[in-house]
Image: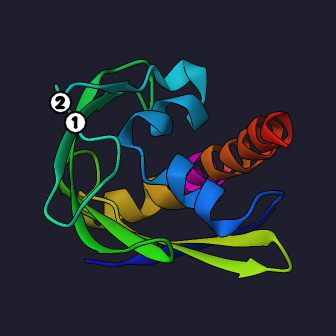
Amino acid sequence: MKKYELYRETLLPVNIDEAWQFFSNPYNLAEITPKEMDFKVVTKELPSEIHSGLTILYTVKPLANVPLKWLSKIREVEAPYRFVDEQLKGPYAYWYHEHTFEEKEGLTVMKDKITYAVPMGWLGQLANTLLVRRKLEQIFDYRSQKILKLFKGIG
């Protein structure tokens, strides 16, 4: 299984506690996901803050408007500095997403490091080159822009 990495860094105009409050709430992911993906939280009665071991079921339409279930588990939480989510079941053969937060002069540097693999062997590798990688980059670019707009409204 060939693994790929995607890395994003965003400077947030809020302190680390405000950043953590937003990103540790599992319901906020839908707010920063492109609307055309029709991202929905399926799990009922989630806590307002993630914790290690928490599993969350979502539905999402990543490609061709086809709905897919995505079961994610929060593997590690070091509030307010870091958390990791991992796909248990979903569109990827492997998905490991590390979120880190570092406060600098009242602002927060947010880093996303995603390690992923696409199913279907060489065909998946081709799909990654032609489509998947570009789509992931668009999603994380959208998130970065959306987050900055949301946090400007907070200050």
> As rendered, which of 54 and 138 lies closer to the eye?
54
Q: Nearer the viewer, residue 30 or 150?
A: 150
Query: At which x and y percent is residue 79?
Result: 42, 72
Residue 51 picture quarter: bottom left
Residue found 59% across the figure and 45% down from its top: 135
The disc at residue 43 is 2
Residue at 62% x, 57% y: name it. Answer: 19
Position of residue 33 relative to residue 81, above or below, is: above
> Which region shows up in magenta?
130-137
Dominant secondary-structure state across the stretch colored magenta: helix
Query: In the drawing, does residue 127 fall left or right of residue 50?
Result: right
Under circle 1, the secondary element is loop
One can see residue 71 in this view: yes
Question: Is residue 133 covered in magenta?
Answer: yes
Q: Which image quarter holds the C terminus?
A: top right
Could you tell me if residue 115 is visible in this image?
Answer: no
Q: Which element type, helix, strand or loop, lies under badge 2? A: loop
In this figure, which residue is indicated by the disc labeled 1?
46
| Residue 126 position in % (x across, y down) | 45, 60
Q: Percent x, y for residue 75?
A: 22, 70
Asked if the residues shown at circle 1 and circle 2 are in contact, with their CB atoms under 8 angstroms apart, the answer is yes
Could you say where residue 58 lies in the image, as x and y percent from the top left?
27, 33
Which quarter shows the N terminus? bottom left
Q: Residue at x 82, y 72 (%)?
A: 106
